[in-house]
Image (tube, rainbow, N blue to C red):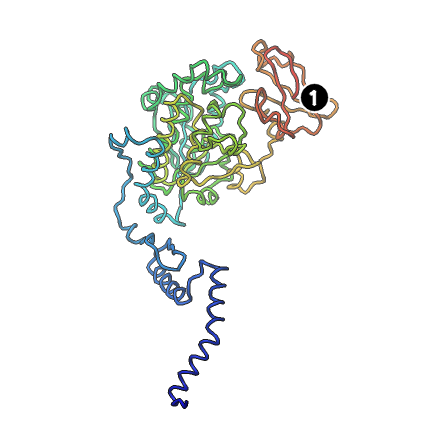
Amino acid sequence: MIFSKPTNFLLFILFIWFLFAPYYLMNYHYNSILNPNKPPRELLVQQKIYINELQQNNKRNIERDDKGRQDNSIIDTQQILSKNIKFWNDFTEEEKRNLDWKQRARLLLKNNEEYLLKSQLENEGKIQNITLVSGLFNLGRGELGNSFTRTFTDYINRFKSFLNYDFPKVIFIEPRYYQEIKEIVDQSPGETKIFFKTIEDIKEEFFAFDKVQAIRTRHDWFTQEGWLTESPQASMELYNPMVMSKIFWTREISEINPFKTDSFLWIDGAHLCNNPEKITQEKMKIFKKHFDKLLITYFDYTPYREIHGFEKEAFYHYIGFDDPNNRPESVKVGRGGVFGGKRAFLQVASEAYKIYLEETLDAGYMGTEENIFSMLHYITPELIHDFDNGPGGNCAIFSEAAKDPPYDWEKHVLEKGYDLRGIRCEIMTDQNNRKACFYYGFDYNVLESDTSAINPIECPAYVTPMLLTKAESQYSCHEEGRYCTVACKSGEYEIW
């Protein structure tokens, strides 16, 4: 049979197709197995063009599905920025009745999603200045008469260091103590605004004052551990109401914003790590980096029976680790001495914090504000940009800001003593040039000032402050590489 020329051409095309098509199809299938998410080239080209258009229009957060197609989550940043979005915390009575605490927290986040996003977009890479917030109250800690005692004079002296920060500052203070710091306030670099607040104000304003009193005076709570009985959160009526209110006060200042700053940072006025000589607005990079959300610093802690008085098993439950066989050995515990961020995140995080605090107190569990900061970390991480203190301890973020080497805790101990939840330890050099440790103040029959009544205990030469940890029933005392010095109520002193 003789074919025409067109027929010959078609047969030639078919021959070429059958010759190369299997190879092409097999290669395409093979590449799809190796890289199933790789979209066809034509879609990649379209995607590149589309992304360039979005960049020109100042849009971001582009997400694409596995085939390279645009999904429905693309965010028009210009539209978000142009909206008048307000902070939402208007739970209906029905929602309060029918939603549990976790559901209310998730609803809070959902209804503030655009509000938080707008805050991030408005300040992205533009945070310029910070208002410092702090407080000075005499809660009576100087009258405890135990190893947790700190005189109010000590607080005032430390607070004077805080006043030397060259930042705009807001201070909550009892009116009766204003004259004691007025001269320093007047000479302080950076403008300072005073907000007067009395002890009665704290009692009336803190929503859970009565619940805190009921728990702290409950025998089964304050006898969980020996140290807890004498602790400030157990023995002082106002300690927890005050420390638990700090995040609300910082939020309040962010809403008033007297200095029109971008962000707000609470620092305990008596914080041991305050460093106004080296920490300035120009050296706040590490803080600003974390102000895309709420900055909270954390440390790792291995619980034995409790965390700051919050019963261990209950705490694991609230942070989402009910199964003892599937939980971390150590937990992240927030630090209350320094935290902060922009107004939007302070508002939403403080509302979530209030939900968590109310739930745990209603259930009869209490630690300090630091336990609730932990719950923020585990339950609503969308709100938190955490900073891990690591071996630098409470001073880690201050040292990072000042670009100082890690804090020398051994030197600190030698000069000032070592305070481990009230069991005081001092490390000195004895006549044999070895480190010696002794505790005092734990024996109720021995006055803290009467150190002659206590014989120093020699520790092995390798023992440093970082090897010492809190004694009496603490799990970490029994860990390999840890060292504990114990002072018993009987007056007998031994080393674990």
- Quick check: 255 left or right of 385? left
Q: Quadrant of residue 167?
A: top left
- Name the image quarter holding the C terminus: top right
Q: Is residue 297 above or below residue 244?
A: below
Q: Residues within 10 Å of mark 1 (few under 14, many from 20)?
A: some
Residue denoted by label 1? 458
Residue that protrudes farthest toward the right in the picture = 432
Residue 436, x across and y down, in percent: 68, 23
- Quick check: 183 left or right of 390? left
- Quick check: 488 left or right of 206? right
Q: Amino acid at mark 1?
A: Glu
- Quick check: 397 left or right of 209? right
Q: Quadrant of residue 293?
A: top left
Residue 54, x across and y down, in percent: 34, 59
Instruction: Please tell me which residue is depicted at 40% across the width and 33% down the height of the picture.
Output: 133
Instruction: Please tell me which residue is depicted at 73% across the width and 26% down the height of the picture.
Output: 433
Name the one closer to the observer, 106 or 355.
106
Number of on-image labels? 1
Residue 62, x across and y down, in percent: 37, 55
Q: Is residue 389 above or below residue 207?
A: below
SS for callout 1: strand
- Name the image quarter holding the N terminus: bottom left
Residue 123, x across and y down, in percent: 37, 47
Residue that protrudes farthest toward the top in the picture = 445
Q: Is residue 19 above or below residue 61?
A: below
Name the one closer to the observer, 418 or 20.
20
> From where the camera sits, is residue 257 visible?
no
